[in-house]
Every structure is written in C-alpha cells, then in structure tokens.
Image: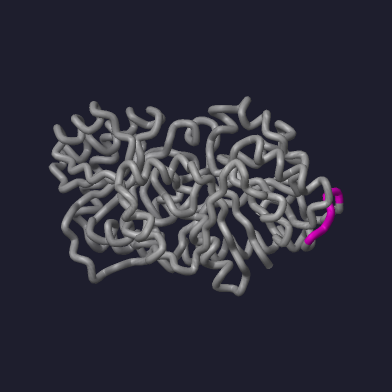
Amino acid sequence: MRFLFYTQSLVSDWNHGNAHFLRGVMRELVGRGHRATALEPRDSWSRLNLIADQGVGPIAAFRKHFPELHAESYDANFDHEAAVSDADVVVVHEWTEPALIARLGRIRRNGGRFTLAFHDTHHRSVSQRREIARLDLTGYDFVLAFGEALRERYLSAGWGKHVFTWHEAADTSLFQPMPEVEKTGDLVWIGNWGDDERSAEIAAFLVEPARRLKLRTTVRGVRYPGAALKALRAAGICYGGWVANAAVPRTFAAHRATMHIPRRPYVEALPGIPTIRVFEALACGIPLISAPWNDAEGLFRAGKDFLFARSGEEMTRLLRQVLSDPAFAEEMTASGLETIRRRHTCAHRVDELLRIVAAYGPRQAVGDSATTKEAAI
C-alpha cells in the first residue's frame, strides 16, 4: 500500500516530537514493503527554526541517518488532489493548516478512493479547544488519538464518529542500549521548555535535586528563556541546546539516569499520555525517574520499569538510590526494556494501524461500515 503522511515536518525534530514517531512508523512500513511519503509545508515552523538555530547541516544529516525515508515539501500552489490520487492511506496530523485539513476531507467526500485519517498527538483539545472544534473532519474515515483520554474527548465532543487510541512508541531500530559508550555524566534530561507548561516542575524535580546532589547534569532542548538558563547555570547544570533525535541514544548512553517531567495539561486533563521520550529512554536501557502523572492505561509497570517521584524531595532520594545501587538500576532498566520490546515499538504501532485500515478496506467510499471502527486499540 501507499501511505501519505501530512506532517509539520519529517526532516526537522526541532521542538517537534511527532517527527520521532513518524520516522519510526514510516521506516517500519517501508521495511515491510509498503511505500511511505511525508508531505510537509515549505515554510514548516519546525524546519525554519532548526535552520535558524543550527544552519542547514541537520537537514543533510537527516538524509544520512534516514536514507530510506522520503519527504516532499508543498506550498500554496501544490496540487494536493494529484498527490492523494494514488494513495491508499492518507494520515493528516493535527498541526496541518485547518484549510488544508478541510480540503483533504472534501477530496475524500467527493470520490477520493483512499482511507483518510486524522492524527492528534497534542493537548490542544484541552488547551485550545475552540481551534480543534473548528476543524472540519467530516470527510475523515477515522481519528487516531495518542491516548484513551484524548479518544474519549473526541467522542464526547462529536469531533469524530470513529476514534482509535494509537499511542506513540519507540523506534527500536534506533533507540537501543549502547553499553560500549562511556558514562561521562550522572543525569540527563532531554526536553523543551515550551510555553511555561512545566517551569515550576522543572525547577522542583530537576534543578533543585541536581543542585542538592551535585550531579554532573546535562539538559538538552530548545526554547529556554534567559531566566531558565540562569537557573540551570546556578545549579551547576550544563545546557547543551538542541540535540538531533538520531543522537539521543548515545546521549542517554553517556549518562547514568534520566527523568520524565510531563507538561501540566497532560497531568491535569489527559491522563495516561506520556511523552515519546519515556518510550525512547526505556528502549535505551537508562534508569528513568518520573515526576507525577497518571498511567491510567497501564502502559508500564510503575516501580519496576521506572520510578515515580511525588515531590522534589522524593526525586532527590530516588536519584541518590538509583545512582548508588547499580544492581537496582540494572534490574529496573531490564524491566523497562522488556516492556518496550513486548508492547511499545513502532512495529507494534504499525501492526495496530494496519488492523485499523484493514477494517475499513482499501479504497472504500466514505460511509461504508466496518464492524470494529469504534474500538480502541
């Protein structure tokens, strides 16, 4: 089958975590003999920011690290009707321009012989509800939501009749343990600052514990304001800026522990949805300690795959325990790695996607029924 993915960017992962998952899904599809192409706007916010921050080198590096992936850019004059004409499945990410989302739905309604899916991997259904409510999804066969709470929100709001839970996952062809890499640091956190959605949590769960324990700590990510950078320096934390996702496994491997600090909208309104970094970190075999979130769907085995810290003080205690007890840390990382390999790889998600698509049948017309459309994966 031919898969077409409309995305903010495949080439750039600057403040754009969905690129991580999409790359893994596309590589898995291509490896199984399918065709997969990503379409991204020529003025992609993520790609333009990456070039402004790092120059064009990362664009060339993407081609080197992911030679099997194909991405095309489009502008206002692009012929989307021609692009989707020979596609079997078209997946449209929620960061796509609303007018284009509606246009693709019209193409589908007006005889388009492809299966059309809308993919939501963000918290805008909570934080920017009106924007999501205004999207025209009437021509879409189904919605892919990256958590059960998000799926339920779509259904209750009437934003899609057929909505499936489709969690993110680790691309284990890239994210895997690298025991040969020397440990040069104690703690690493890879995460973007982003709109003050977790600034207090970063201070309480990362900055203060690292300062108290005098850990060799590195932070990688973007959009850190001056006050945040000053706080990191005062705590003795090294800020390294953006890191390409292809380089993250080695970054994890060079440190003895990492952590998860969820954004507030997920904790408060969308339980059960971790960031993709949780999947990726566990796939790399690095001990993970997380600030509070509700694993409402039982994705992991808390206390075995990773540890929960309910406060900054508990984060300090757990970091001390993990870093001082190698046997305990090794047992936890083995458990987390086993859970990823058993349940949360991009191969698992492609299996799920193909089952969903098969239920609709290739090139059915809108309105045709399928017996399993409203079941969550």
Q: Is residue 303 left or right of residue 250?
A: right
Residue 19 seen:
yes
Q: Is residue 105 magenta?
A: no
The range drawn in magenta is 363-367
Quadrant into which the N terminus falls: bottom right
Residue 232's image quarter?
top left
Reply above or below: 154 against 302.
Answer: above
Q: Is residue 366 magenta?
A: yes
- Residue appearing at x 48%, y 42% in the figure: 43
Q: Is residue 38 left or right of residue 204?
A: right
| Image coordinates for residue 170, horizontal then vertical, percent | 46, 59
| Image coordinates for residue 253, horizontal then vertical, percent | 27, 61
Q: Main secondary structure of the magenta part?
A: loop
Colouring chosen for the image of the structure: one colour
Q: In the image shown, does 2 or 316 lie closer to the viewer?
A: 2
Residue 343 seen:
no
Reply above or below: 37 against 239.
Answer: below
